[in-house]
Amino acid sequence: MYAIVEIAGQQFKVEEGRKVFVHRLADKQGDKVEFSKVLLIDNNGAVTVGSPTVEGAKVTAEVLSHLKGDKVIVFHKKRRKGYRKRNGHRQYLTELKINSIVA
């Protein structure tokens, strides 16, 4: 069983027991969070598609940790002009463990 759920403005495919990295949430480590914007549920081949969300469906998860992602290098260059600019970025992330999917 899996579900497509919207978390912090992005859509994720989640399954029970799996870990997901999402953009930083305001909840503290160890908190239980609940997401009600479930867009699709697949229960062993029986697919339920919401319009826009599935009524009565929710996904519960636990916040495991807050961390920073891998460094991404942003490099701008204009050829033959001597223009080069290099910048780095590390995204703040939250690790979630999916506890249950209620259809």
Image: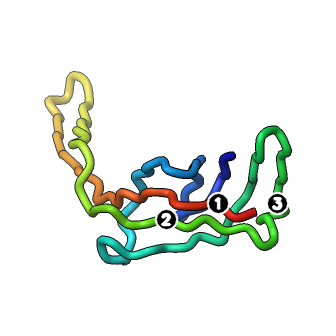
Asked if the residue at tag 1 contacts the one at tag 3, i.e. Cβ–Cβ closer than 8 Å, the answer is no
In what element is the residue under mark 1? strand
| Closer to the camera in the image, 43 or 23 | 43
Badge 1 crowding class, 10 Å Cα cut-off, few under 14, some 14 to 19, many 20 or more, is many
- At label 1, the amino acid type is Ile
Q: Which mark is residue 61?
A: 2
In what element is the residue under mark 2? strand
Q: Quadrant of residue 91?
A: bottom left
In what element is the residue under mark 3? loop
Q: Is residue 88 left or right of residue 59?
A: left
- At label 3, the amino acid type is Gly
| Closer to the camera in the image, 58 or 50 | 58
Asked if the residue at tag 2 contacts the one at tag 3, i.e. Cβ–Cβ closer than 8 Å, the answer is no
Percent x, y for residue 3?
A: 67, 52
Task: Work out whether mark 1 precedes mark 2 in sequence or the reverse, and give the earlier one.
Answer: 2
Percent x, y for residue 81?
A: 19, 29
Q: Quadrant of residue 79?
A: top left
Q: Which residue is mark 1?
A: 101
Q: Nearer the viewer, mark 3 or mark 1?
A: 1
Q: Gap between marks 1 and 2, in whole Å?
A: 9 Å
Q: Which mark is residue 50?
A: 3
Vertical comparison of 66 with 48: above or below: below
